Image: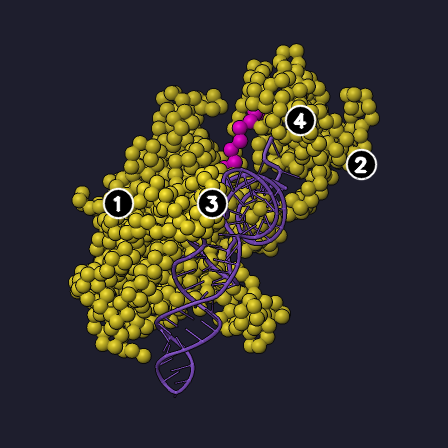
Chain colours: A yellow, B purple
Amino acid sequence: MPPHRYTAALAGAIERRWQDRWEAADTFAVPNLPPAQAGEKFYLMDMFPYPSGSGLHVGHPLGFIGTDVLGRYLRMTGRTVLHTMGFDAFGLPAEQYAVQTGTHPRTTTEANIARYREQIRQLGLAHDQHRSVSTTDIDFYRWTQWIFLQIHGAWYDREADRARPITELEEELAAGIRALPDGRDWATLSRPEQDRVLDDHRLAYLADAPVNWCPALGTVLSNEEVTADGRSERGNFPVFRRNLRQWMMRITSYADRLADDLDGIDWPDSVKAMQRNWIGRSQGAQVRFASDAGDIEVFTTRPDTLFGATYLVLAPEHPMVDALVPAAWPSPPTGDELDGRWTGGADTPADAVAQYRSVVASRSDLERQEARDKTGVFTGAWATNPVNGEALPVFVADYVLMGYGTGAIMAVPGQDQRDWDFATVFGLPIRRTVQPPEDFDGEAYVGAGAAINSANDEVSLNGLDVDEAKTAIVTWLAGRGAGESVVQYKLRDWLFSRQRYWGEPFPVAYVAEGETDGGPSIPRALPDADLPVLLPDVEDYSPKSFAPDDRDSSPESPLARATEWVAFDADLVSDPEHGWTGYVRETNTMPQWAGSCWYYLRYLDPHNKERFVDPDVERYWLGPKGPGDPGGVDLYVGGVEHAVLHLLYARFWHKVLFDLGHVSSSEPFRRLFNQGYVQAWAYTDARGVYVPAEEVAGDAASGFTWNGEPVRQEYGKMGKSLRNVVTPDEMCDAYGADTFRLYEMSTGPMEASRPWSTRDVVGSHRFLQRVWRLVIDEQTGDLRVADTEPDRDTLTALHRAIDGVRTDLPAMHYNTAVAKLIELANHLTKTYPAGGTPRSVVEPLVLMLAPLCPHLAEELWSRLGHPDSLAFAPFPEADPALLVEDSTEYPIQVNGKVRSRITVPATAGQDEVRDAALADPKVAELLAGAEPRKVIVVPGRLVNVVR
RNA sequence: GCCCCCGUAGCCCAAUCGGCAGAGGCAGCGGACUCAAAAUCCGUCCGGUGUGGGUUCGAGUCCCACCGGGGGCACCA
């Protein structure tokens, strides 16, 4: 082994040396407010990790390395880059570990963070270390609590279409500028009554609402945390709908802005589509059908089909059902017999409904989804269609959901397949009100067409297209007070409390002995001086949990047991009626999403004791660049799994802060990029048990074996349970961090998922050895470069590489950038086999390699005689004159097939190329004297002669 | 069921506007070095782009249908 070869050991020594040097020199620190002469700012961010106990595997740093390469490139092209890394450290695993072992979650969390920091440090990421924060830092969650109080202290002014301080609402109510919704006089209300009015408007509020209660986890969950089949995203336990008093955030106030503002940000279409879908805005109409129990209000997106409604359906849980049900089965208004299918064989409508409800309740969400057969029962009631006075039977069926619209629909089987299916099962009439095309042979017709069968004495839709008909009928309904145009959303308010220990405590207080008017407790904001509200020490970290299917159990937070913490005294301006004593704390904590809703703001100003972020600093890094620009982080990189949850919540918080004047940007993340995942092969033996992937031999052709036994290959996530984890530590030991970085960047484009393949890593290592050898003699350690002029071919190769790399790196096309560097290095190795590579070529190569392999590049740069770090050295620039060669070779196609080649001077015009092509003997032969019909010359590319 | 993305060499991947299918890496094969092996170095084989149509002078690229893979939504009225 030559003594100065670039081995893993040498790489390791070089890497540690440069990491220490960067740290000592604070190379990547950036001031909160860079001086005026600094280059244009760029705020670069990764989605921060949850520091799990098992540390990083090679998949985790893919995005971190990608952002680091970009950040380093941008610094070398004159930009001022802010890039750091934090930790999303509240959350369930540390708490569950605490429950098992009694170790405080903070101890576990801080140990895990220390481990993550070490692993990240050895990768050589150019982070500003001073800005690193963790959501569990007291200095951090103090401001999470402060932001909560801002949201709690705000209401949404519909007219102004923005949030405003609740104090302004109070002033307007007190001054009589704004009337109370129920017509009461503000001045006559007691203080608790006034407070309740205000609470009804706050963006953070307590509500008795149907929530997702997960007995097995002992906590409630947000809609976003519940899977489509009604189980917890974490742990896959059953989740039940229960009415509980919980903290909610009024994210629905922002539904329109959250949907509309997607147009102004540079995000992947798929993520925008997922957010739009989750918000689920649909334009429609609310229509009232009179019944004996009062008006039944339905929501429809197709008011134009109102004349085709032949029955109504209410969700089984609809509050009007009981009032609608008559004592006995009625006779139909038509005078016919009551259809036997309608009654479910029950003696009375009440029995039928009760029976049906119990059947529905016993069906799990999964069963309900799988079995799409239409079931339901007649309530015994009729309602009146406002457009034609027809009596429509009212059914109860579980294909109508209480959680969307009004929980009631008008059924139009002619234009809706679900209604068609139901009508078929129950023998209900079907009437088309949109003319299907002549060749239409389906059932319900949902397409465009002219309205038919749609007229009464006052209004006729017949002949109108769908949109015209909608407008006409809504106008008519509105004139009669029977309906109006409305917008519906799937989005629900955000359930914001959890019955957990390891989360941010709520900075609120309740009067211990109850409100003076005997009503429910009013949460009072704590004064700023009382922040942070620290987590108390407790004996037992677990919430009370229950059997997974115990739906009637109730949540109980671990904080409730910290009785000395719960009871406290405070001087609350938010509670003018009371004194200074006798308060109790909120014992729920905030969900894990809270910290990640604003951490990008704290990165900007992490040590500020007075504010969560200084306004000037926020404006510098996040402010809009001009009119119409929303502002925000310049590039945010992370996995697509946060498409809805984190990214929707963060946008919501940011918009509240924007409305209240705390930030100048209206969106948190100007550009979002989803990196792919590193996946891995896993292997199972004959019993289906996973075997250690690193011990498997063989290949796809000859079959895989483990200990001589055949095993089956499968593809999936990297993880302990699949026994296929590879860690960055192993790769750094075996090859060095630069090789590992280079390999991860060269296996594919950033957005693509790709399989991990340890045995391919050697290719990246060999390339770095070649580069090393171009500069350093492996035997002596001396420089091998010469101060000579490169030949013309080498210059062209260099400038083409520069040109390509300058295009590829900022576009995050790292795999092709790497290919171009390898190509150049291979050219140099071949051209200068005995050494003496011109310094003027080697130095740009080293600089171009620096973003990808910073340690190696720094070392070579230093050995080439440059005392300063190359972190801010100018990135090479291509000379356009050197990109082109003197002559160009053109393939000549005849009728699309390559038949010959010609070489012409690079300066040749189209006519010269054409003439040269036609003069080619092979082409002349194929033409056989005939004039070509057409000759296509693509400059620099090819010539096609059409015969 | 609906929507989105992707199918190029044994494997991972390149290929501006439609313009010579191949940049790069792995594996394989041959050779150099070595007593031998590993490591390293040099050289080299391999496919016509999932399938079938269409548009075009020319299609990996555009259009249609199908097949395969991945993701999202899923009785949302």
Instruction: Write the start and end of the magenta stretch as one range.
Output: A279-286
Task: Count neighbours of disc 3 (C-alpha within 10 A) and say few if under 14, some if 14 to 19, many if 20 or more.
Answer: some
State the SS at label 1.
strand
Q: Is tag 4's residue or tag 2's residue first in the polypeptide sequence? A: 2
Seen from this angle, which residue lies furthest right?
A337
Residue pictured at 38% horizontal, 30% vertical: A162
Say what amino acid the circle numbered 3 marks: Leu
To which residue does mark 1 refer? A41
For the residues tagged 2 and 3, is the chain the same? yes
Quadrant (top left, top right, bottom left, bottom right) of the N terminus of chain A: bottom left
Q: How would you classify the magenta stretch by its main secondary structure?
A: strand
Which of label 2 and label 3 is nearer to you?
Answer: 3
Residue pictured at 53% horizontal, 28% vertical: A283
Say what amino acid the circle numbered 2 marks: Gly
Task: Count neighbours of disc 1 (C-alpha within 10 A) and say few if under 14, some if 14 to 19, many if 20 or more.
Answer: some
Q: Is residue A284 magenta?
A: yes
Q: Are circles 4 and 3 on residues that touch, CB within 8 Å?
A: no
Residue pictured at 71% horizontal, 21% vertical: A391
Residue nearer the viewer, B39 or A911? A911
Q: Is residue A708 left or right of residue A192?
A: right
* Quadrant in the picture for residue A117: bottom left
Query: Can the viewer see residue A580 in this picture?
Result: no
To which residue does mark 3 refer? A927
Q: Is tag 1's residue or tag 3's residue first in the polypeptide sequence? A: 1
Which of label 1 and label 2 is nearer to you?
Answer: 1
Q: CA distance from mark 4 to mark 3?
A: 57 Å
To which residue does mark 4 refer? A436
Q: Is residue A155 magenta?
A: no
Residue nearer the viewer, A1 or A689? A1
Say what amino acid the circle numbered 4 marks: Pro
To which residue does mark 2 refer? A345
Residue A67 higher or lower than A611, as above or below: below
